[in-house]
Amino acid sequence: MQGSEIRPGERVKKVSFTEDTLSVDLIDGRTIVVPLVWYPRLLDASSEQRQNWQVSAAGYGIHWPEIDEDLSTAGLLRGAPAADRVWARS
């Protein structure tokens, strides 16, 4: 199946945040930057909860245990927001 092959370079190296973005550095040198509004659990999490992440899925995923959030590098590269995203916040 084309497009679903494993690409070792797409594994997570580092995760960081700004006030309104999530950045994921991959081991191949690329950085994925997405708006936090795409991921309401991360948006609503404290800074400490955001920093408590773990690499999962053999390096192709990120897990935040305190807020039960999981993201994959494949989904981030596709630009796939969470299904329950919130575009406008009051």
Image: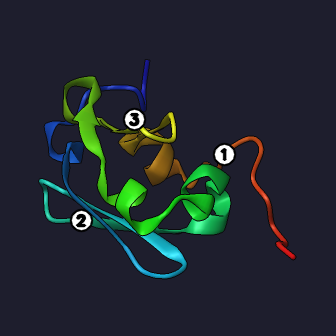
Amino acid carrying label 3: it is: Pro
Amino acid carrying label 1: it is: Ala
In the picture, measured across the screen, residue 26 lies left or right of residue 39, that is left
Q: Quadrant of the C terminus?
A: bottom right
Q: Residue 65 has which mark?
A: 3
Q: In front: mark 1 or mark 3?
A: 3
Mark with earlier residue (2, 3): 2
Label 3, secondary structure: give it.
loop
Answer few, some or many: residues within 10 Å of disc 3's Cα (few below 14, many 20 plus, some between 14 and 19).
few
Q: Quadrant of the N terminus?
A: top left
Where residue 39 appears, as percent x and y from the top left, is 61, 54
Where residue 53 appears, as percent x and y from the top left, is 30, 47
| Disc 2 from disc 3: Cα separation | 25 Å
Amino acid carrying label 2: it is: Arg
Determine whether 70 is above or below 5 in the image: below
- Residue beneath the point at 20% across and 25% down: 58
